[in-house]
Amino acid sequence: MARSDIRIVTIDNVHPDFYRLLGPLLARRDVHKSLGGPPWDDEGKRWTIAIATSPDSHQEHAAGFIGLTSRGSLESLWAEPAHRDTLYPRLVATAVKAADGRAMHTTVTHTRAAAYAKAGFTTVSTTANYAKMIWEPSP
């Protein structure tokens, strides 16, 4: 699937397409394994979703997502394995724009850190498996 075949939207859990798009992924074992746990749908969370259209059936499905909490935590970055290299940076960048200039923070695996750095996040500390990162608006 080419990049142009995927569109990115930001919605919350009251949007009429939320459960149609994200519902099938919220309880999948492979998604939980990739994230290191389940993605929680807290009230006030906004989801940036990469929507792909299957060429054969013309059905839409979520090819990736990331969540932004009301506290400014950017979390649960996931994409289909074939699209991670292209979708991770696009999802993070779109979520940053959707945050409307407010400060954000995240704790991510090292494999995801490059996508955040590309969107302007700075690493503040690391452990063997994770990087704590922040994004602050320019003065």
Image (cartoon, grey):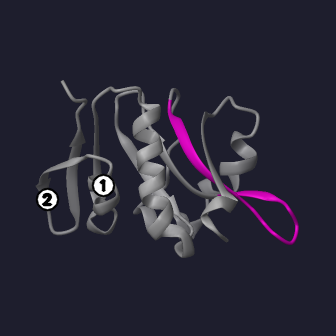
Q: Is residue 51 left or right of residue 74?
A: right
Local crowd size for mark 2, using a 10 Å CA cut-off: few (<14), some (14–19), many (≥20): some
Q: Residue furthest front?
A: 4
Magenta region, residue range: 45-62
Q: Quadrant of residue 97?
A: top left
- Residue for point 53% across, 74% down: 81
> On the rendered structure, is 58 left or right of 76?
right
**Which quarter shows the N terminus?**
bottom right
The residue most toward the bottom is 82
Q: Residue at x 23, y 33 (%)?
A: 136
Q: Nearer the viewer, mark 1 or mark 2?
A: 1
Residue in the foreground of this view, choosing between 43 and 75: 75
User: In the rendered image, which quarter is residue 137 located in?
Assistant: top left
Badge 1: few (under 14), some or many (20 or more) residues near its Cα, within 10 Å?
some
The reply to whether residue 19 is visible in this rendering is: yes
The amino acid marked with disc number 1 is: Lys
Residue 108 percent location from the top left of the image = 30, 57
Q: Residue at x 34, y 63 (%)?
A: 112
- In percent of width and height, residue 104 lies at 30, 35
In the rendered view, would you say 65 is above or below 16? below
Residue 50 is one of the magenta-drawn residues: yes
Q: Secondary structure at mark 2?
A: strand
Amino acid type, residue under disc 2 in the picture: Thr
Q: Position of residue 71 (x, y in %)?
A: 35, 28
Please give the name of the residue rendered at 40% of the width and 47% of the height, measured from the top-left corner: 75
Residue 26's tag is none
Q: Is residue 136 toward the left or the right of residue 111 in the image?
A: left
Spot the residue most to the right: 57
What residue does disc 2 label? 126
**Corner quadrant of residue 57:** bottom right
Q: Nearer the viewer, residue 117 or 127?
A: 117
